[in-house]
Image (cartoon, rainbow, N blue to C red):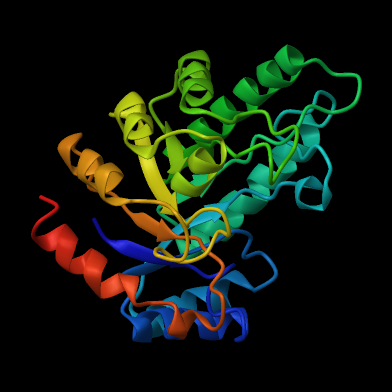
Amino acid sequence: MPICANLSLLFTELPLLERVRAAADAGFDGVEIQFPYEVPAVELKAALDRAGLPLVLINLPAGDLMQGGAGLAGVPGREAEFAAALEQALAYAAVVAPQKVNVLAGRASEGVTREQALAVLADNLRLAAEAFAATGGGVLMEAINLHDMPGFLLNTPAHLLEMLARVGHRNLAAQLDFYHMARMGLALEPCVRQLAGHIGHVQFADVPGRGEPGSGQLDFLPALRALREEGYSGWLGAEYRPAAKATASLDWLPRWRQGLRESWR
């Protein structure tokens, strides 16, 4: 399983384009970026090419979600805005070629029931999955904990499985974030087993502080072994907030690499 650096949280003392080279120098196999759209796509592509790293994952634009709003994907009446965000992501992806695109479900808006929000979300996920299928890019959705993002529509593996069944598209998979599952009070290994065969990407950070592995309470080993046993061979995304500079937080990286090569098989 290759390991990528999330450049929205790591190497943030540098401008975004310089973080790509920093990730390569630190020994990561690839990079992911939550919302890269502030940087011209051709400039990001050039930085990736210079560093020799693939772009593993980006998010679809999410409207006002990160400012505390409902976002776009699950909001009745914002279908046109979601379609515009999808077109923006498709145009950006045509240049930078991310392997996967994550659609953030968002929150139920005021006056809208959860079921109404989920129905719109399913339609929008199906639209995105079909659009990116034509480009070869995969579409993901993730469960996010209710402590960090109150009201988020998808919070557990069961929610992800229910939405996968509702959407029913081969180009949609689950993004499993160990940090968010642990914050929901869930054990990681059962989450892996529950989602087996449906996991398109994995992210990690320690709990409670969302720091690097070893900074908190999580034992990642059972979940990593379960991933291998269940046939997952995709990416592991380091989406954590280092206590200091990212370069000082990487003691875990050689241990994980050795474990993935040897004893964790």
The residue closer to the viewer here, 250 or 41, is: 250
Going 14% across and 52% down the picture, which residue do you hit?
Answer: 264
Which residue is at the far front? 217
Up/down of 37 relative to 14, above or below: above
Up/down of 145 relative to 40, above or below: above
The residue closer to the viewer here, 205 or 128, is: 205
* x and y, in percent, of residue 78 in the image: 82, 32
Corner quadrant of residue 82: top right
Going 59% across and 59% down the picture, which residue do you hit?
Answer: 34
The residue closer to the viewer here, 150 or 41, is: 150
The residue closer to the viewer here, 60 or 147, is: 147
Going 43% across and 76% down the picture, which residue do you hit?
Answer: 48
- Relative to residue 183, is residue 74 drawn left or right? right
* x and y, in percent, of residue 93 in the image: 52, 57
- Relative to residue 251, is residue 102 drawn left or right? right
* x and y, in percent, of residue 36 in the image: 62, 65
From where the camera sits, is residue 131 visible? no
Going 52% across and 14% down the picture, which residue do you hit?
Answer: 166
Corner quadrant of residue 23: bottom left
Up/down of 194 relative to 113, above or below: below
* x and y, in percent, of residue 196 in the image: 29, 29
- Relative to residue 180, is residue 106 drawn left or right? right
Q: Quadrant of the N terminus?
A: bottom left
